[in-house]
Amino acid sequence: MTGRETGPGTYLGMPAFPDPDPARFPAFPEAAREAVRDAALRANLRYATHTIRDKRARAVAELADWDRLRAAGKAVKDRTLRHLDRYLLQLEESVTAAGGTVHWAADAAEANRIVTELVLATGEREVVKVKSMATQEIGLNEALEAAGVTAYETDLAELIVQLGHDRPSHILVPAIHRNRGEIRDIFRAEMGRWGRPAPEGLGDSPAELAEAARLHLREKFLRAKVGISGANFMVAETGTMVVLESEGNGRMCLTLPETLISVVGIEKVVPTFRDLEIFLQTLPRSSTAERMNPYTTLWTGLGPSKGADGDGPSAFHLVLLDNGRTDILADEVGRQALRCIRCSACLNVCPVYERAGGHAYGSVYPGPIGAVLSPQLRGTGSPIDASLPYASTLCGACYDVCPVAIDIPEVLVHLRERVVQGGPVTRRGVRVRIRPARGHAAERAAMRAARLLLDRPDALRAGERLLARARRLGIRPHRLPGPGRAWTDARELPEPPPEPFRDWWARERGTATRTGSKDRKGDDGPK
Amino acid sequence: MRVALFVTCVNDALYPATGVAVVRLLERLGVAVDFPAGQTCCGQPQYNTGYRHEAEPLLRRTAAAFEGHPYVVTPSGSCAAMVREHYPRMGRRAAAEGRGSALAELADGLAPRVYELTEFLVDVLGVTDVGAYFPHVVTYHPSCHGLRSLGLGDRPRRLLAAVKGLELVELPGAEECCGFGGTFAVKNPDVSAAMGADKLRSARASGAEVLCGADNSCLAHLGGMLRRRDDPLRTLHIAEILAATEEDAPR
Ligand code: SF4
């Protein structure tokens, strides 16, 4: 099978827009242009990313064995992914033995259908949610809404996004693009429509905003009969689910409702309970720069009493989500992206994210990890997905901070190759060969021409001499046409030198090699 | 000692003064310099833009050009990183694609012999004071590939600090990328220019007259922005500072 990728095979969040519609999600450079010009947004992002970036660096520097923890995390994840089938079956067995029910969802539609049916079967029309990337990825809230079920986000930043009819722009801090004043305005305008209104005369101090959210959310926690979560880790050996969080809203959602449904990507499994030792150190330090996050909730099915003691939920459902992950697993270079533990350190350190903001990435996964994940999950057919692999200078800051050592630049270059050359990919378990994405023919021709020139030193030399002649003729363009315009819009071109280096060499050194004599007059190089 | 100079295509065509500076500097330190004429470009633009297969002939050419040279020295951190990090990777990919191990053998044979200039000076020659004279206030921008792929660390700054007359000032946020990124500069011009502007703001805040770097491609981006604004701050490759003496000052 061969063909051009037309649209995304996989639903990747951005609620209600199953396809990254080019009108709403233009290619990255266009989307980024607006953000770059938005001075307030850039100031918010710069302040937020630099603060957390510096704190992370300090938190990581405290651990003498950080490099070993990082290597161990990488090794555990790689080993798990290599034998993913086995660990998932073991997980299913452990969860089932502990009184939970395991469901398998091949894609977003199947996962949404399973969850919707489970909720409707309880007779409830409201659910409370713990912050979860997987449920955003599949657009669960929108699917539930279509079935007449209201999902309430309970994480503070998710609440801000939900109340503001907004899109998340960061994995950990989805409202990072908002400042306090904007949050106060959203709370004042919207809280009343969803439940308890914001207190009279609400100010914009963090304490006031947090208190308003607490009051608004508390009535939801106490009323809800169904909770929906994701998980940071799942332990195959014991069937234990693990959620790390800072606010305590997760603990509420995981313990108060009668029915708990967790939607988790299949790559979140780890083999043994001991493996958590690594990630419970690396994840908090990488994401919130804390030694330990305030709340870590672990639960194993319904517990030893299978829920009979009335403590915690009396029904637990685990929905294991593939949604393109096994296809990624089939790709030797790209599969390392599945090691990701969603800490968001790569976003906070990324100079491109800092200027472009999260929305420009057109996916629930922004930043460097988004740039390698979205085009793998959705394919490289749409303008946004074909441009994401290029949304990086390959500076390597993301790789440096990644607690599971994902070589994001390597994967970006690999995906660039897929965009411009096509090649083998796996789609729904079938190996296919895709054709290059549209709009790269001229570049391909130019790259080929450059290579042919560069493969012949004499031709290169002729070209270089042409440049020198242009200089002598006084040809010094300040504006270039075509793709070169993007360079000269902001910068002057380098001044062409009087002669290329190889001509200087031939004249001054000839073929003979001379060694370091101190006095060498008259070999003036190009000035 | 004898080394082969890998001048790089950008320096050959646009910044020959950097190549000349490397030759003079090394010769002053008693090192004989060869310039194998078969060299052109390492293929980094092709590779990084997604045209790995177009880069393969350039890998072969580069490996052949430097065949038999135990030390290959280049005044570019990113070209050194290309050869050291990506060539072996290209070789492995070719082998994985069922095209045999020839490319991998060439890549693995060349990679360990390639040194970025400051690395060669400090690690192989064991010098930090190269006898240079440059009476200016200088700040150093460590380009990303030198900083993160090669791990050059403080080698360039140690070399600069030992230059007579030179006052080295810290660049705030030095480790942040300047926004060049090869074809990134034209594919994402707005973000690239925003990053460049921030880098230049830091450079000006440092109080330096000269913004020094070890990669002329990054300096072409930053210098081009400076000249567009007629900014008095100027960019200069570290080789040209290290080659400067009291008798022979650079531009
Ligand atoms: S790619 Fe690495 S740094 Fe980025 S979110 Fe995932 S684990 Fe964290």
Image (spheres, coloured by chain):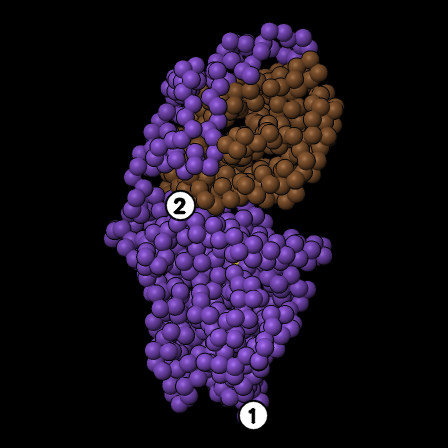
Chain colours: A purple, B brown
Percent position of residue B125, x then y: 69, 25
Residue occupying the point 59% across, 61% down = A287
Label 1 resides on the chain identified as A
Residue occupying the point 62% across, 19% down = B250
Above or below B5: residue B43 = below
Q: Quadrant of ligand 1?
A: bottom right
Residue occupying the point 49% across, 19% down = A497
Rendering quarter of residue A12 = bottom left
Residue closest to the eye, A289 or A182:
A182
Query: Which element is circle 2 on?
Result: helix
Residue occupying the point 43% across, 46% down = A390
Q: Quadrant of the C terminus of chain A?
A: top right
Residue B88, disc? none
Circle 1: residue type: Gly
Which residue matches tag 1? A310
The answer as to whether callout 1 falls within 8 Å of ligand 1 is no
Circle 2: residue type: Arg
Tally the marks: 2
> Which of the marked residues, 1 or 2, is nearer the chain's N terminus?
1
Above or below A146: residue A358 = above
Residue A370 appears in the rendering: yes
Label 2 resides on the chain identified as A
Rendering quarter of residue A449 = top left
